[in-house]
Amino acid sequence: MNAEPIIDARGVRTHFGGVEVLRGVDLAVGRGEVLAIVGASGSGKTTLLRAFNYLTPFTHGEVHIAGHRLKPGMSERADAGLLRRVRTRVGMVFQHFHLFPHLTALRNVTEAPQRVLGLASAHAQARAHALLERVGLAAHVHAYPQTLSGGQQQRVAIARALAMEPDVLLLDEPTSALDPRLVGEVLAVIADLAAGGQTMVIVTHEIAFARRVAHRVVVFDAGLIVECGTPAEVLERPRMAATRSLLAMD
Amino acid sequence: MTRRLLCVFTRALALVALTCTLTRAADDGLAGMRARGTLRWGGDIQGGEPYAFQDPHDSSRLLGFEVEIADALARRLGVRAEFVQNDWSTLIPSLERGDFDVVMNGLEVTAARRQRVAFSRPYYAFSETLVVRRDETSLHSLDDLHGRRAGTLAGSFGFDLLRATAGVEVVLYEGVEEPYIDLEQRRLDAVVLDNIIADRYGLVRPTLQAGGTVGEGTYAIAVRPRDRALLLAVDAALAGMIRDGELRTILTRWSLWNERQEQLTASLPPTSEHTPAATPSPAQGLLFLRAAGFTVLISTLAMGLAVAGGLLLSVARRYGGTVLRIAATTYIEIFRGTPVLLQLYVLYYGLAPLLTLSAFTAAVVGLGMNYAAYEAELYRAGLQAVPIGQTEAALSLGMSRSLALRRIVLPQALRIALPGIANDFIALLKDSSLVSVITVVELTKQMTITAVDVRSWVWPGLLCAGLYLALSYPLSRLARRLERRLLPVPV
């Protein structure tokens, strides 16, 4: 692991209306690290993840990410250039995939490299074919998203994010919207990425998966990090009540 | 279901047929008029002063020399005169339908009209005045108009004259002011209309002058041919008005008395006029096709403009700053909230002093600007229907907001809007008939012109309807095909 963290969040706070969703979060993620964030629903995990690429703005604190600094009060219009530079380096995978329904799997993957990075069409296509093959979808490159299963769609979404060759990949509950039968194929792809050294932050409810794949596990409760350590420390010898109740549910 | 519909339809048809029969039976000319106690006379107050027009100080009252003649006639026939408003170009069909007993509204006696209606003795002798701009010195007769654009009223004597002249491009109007406005704006080289109109609406303009007199004729009262008794009674009453000088008094009061009227009233039998014959020809089918082509051309260009404008407006309204948003909303409310007919008038005639558009350009721009407002709302609904996650996914890949809009959100929004767009195109195809008010001869206008020529609304009407269907049906098929192709999976 590199000494310089790829993400360094300090004192991040935000609220929706009168409710404080993040109440002062400090978190650093090193290069090459796989970090799992677990916690009860509504504890603020997803909000923190979305604060990392500023899809959800925060009101206090700061986030250093991929060599840039995000701060409260930025806007999509006024800070468009900075946000674009951050997001070009930070990939995101959504719970509900959000594939572009009017484009084939291949075009979903080539669109941003071509239009944002300026890759030549042939180059972008070669990269997309390789990635789709890596996630096991070589046979479906010309399929439209609606014709694919949820698991297949999520794997296209992972390939789409990877095509930008991001410094860090943010995954927001990537298997929560899936039929239980399809969870395994997606987790296998993520485990493969972890083995390949891809830096990742994964918000997940799959405790067993976190234990197996993550270098470090962070437990969230009511907008705060309550426990942090290796899977062995946190998941085998939990110190906090919140962690224990989470493990009891698993 | 279909059978029930068919049944309802058949009954409705039978009812209409019955009503028609009843109307015809009750419609026994003179007797009917006496029984009612009113002489119903048809005219168009849009023809304006001095024929029959609304009193500017009391809109419930009519003024005009024809109003006074009608009152005098009715008095002599022992009844009351009752005016019935009707578009000038359809006065004769309405007379045949029985909407009124007689027509008196500057109706020139022509051979074509004589085949459909019976005319009384004339009550006014007019001359046909060629009006040109003051800087124009070479136009004095109809033959001088070769290769030029000349305006007149649809279905008028002037139209017959111009049509019988070789090489003239004829432009048709519904109102009496508009041809002279266009002459001043150089959209026309000359206007050929009755001297009453020319004197009051054309020659009062300082930039215009009379180029010459190109024909003469008479106004008479039109009666259905089978109402012989009514015709005789009207003729007798008119003769009485001429003998005791009442007609002269009325015409003098309206400054219409001149030598021509002296001669007219001196020779009692109706004079024979210069009347070019209407020539129904097989070439009329070609005219229809040409007009249909114009309808397609105008609709397509206007739709292109509407789609582009609608896109800009909807994006401005959804993503723009405060100023842009308010501007777009104002535009949409104004263009959606006022009649397209009014917008066409304002664009073509109202703005003429500032901006001289050709009729064709004005038609395309007018329809396009109007439909842009509707398209904008359609696309806005489409934009709103695209999930926010699509924008977030695009932004998270480093796309700029405009790139995300162009490549990800708009294509999906347009797909959602596509059925509505096809609908609007079909509606526009039919609304394009409105541009006839600014002198463009498209399909519907061609139909009314031909109907007057061939003295029947049946086959021109059917042909016109058939052509519209032939245009719109493939369009709706195409829309369905596109929808299927653009949505990869039928939902």
Image (spheres, coloured by chain):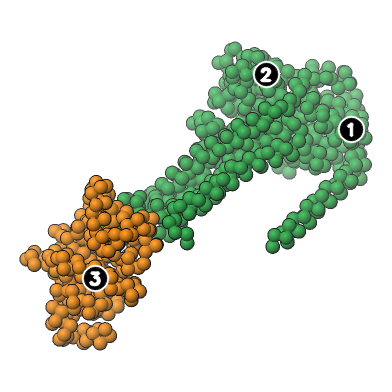
Chain colours: A orange, B green
Q: CA distance from mark 1 to mark 2?
A: 34 Å
Amino acid type of the residue that numbered disc 3 sits on in the rendered structure = Ala
Q: Is residue B367 left or right of residue B409?
A: right
What percent of the width, then of the height, locates residue B121? 86, 26
Q: Chain of mark 2?
A: B
Amino acid type of the residue that numbered disc 1 sits on in the rendered structure = Leu
Q: Closest to the observer: A219 or B46? A: A219
What percent of the width, then of the height, locates residue B101? 84, 39
Secondary structure category for the residue under label 3:
helix
Q: Chain of mark 3?
A: A
Q: Is residue B358 left or right of residue A198?
A: right
Residue lying at the far front of the rendered structure:
A139
Amino acid type of the residue that numbered disc 2 sits on in the rendered structure = Thr
Secondary structure category for the residue under label 2:
loop
On residue B165, the disc is 2
Residue lying at the far top of the rendered structure:
B138
Q: Is residue B57 above or below residue B1?
A: above
On residue B231, the disc is 1
Q: Quadrant of residue B456?
A: top right
Within-10-Å neighbours for mark 1: few <14, some 14–19, many 20+: many
On residue A188, the disc is 3
Contact, mark 3 vs mark 1 (Cβ under 8 Å):
no
Residue located at (14% from left, 74% from top): A215
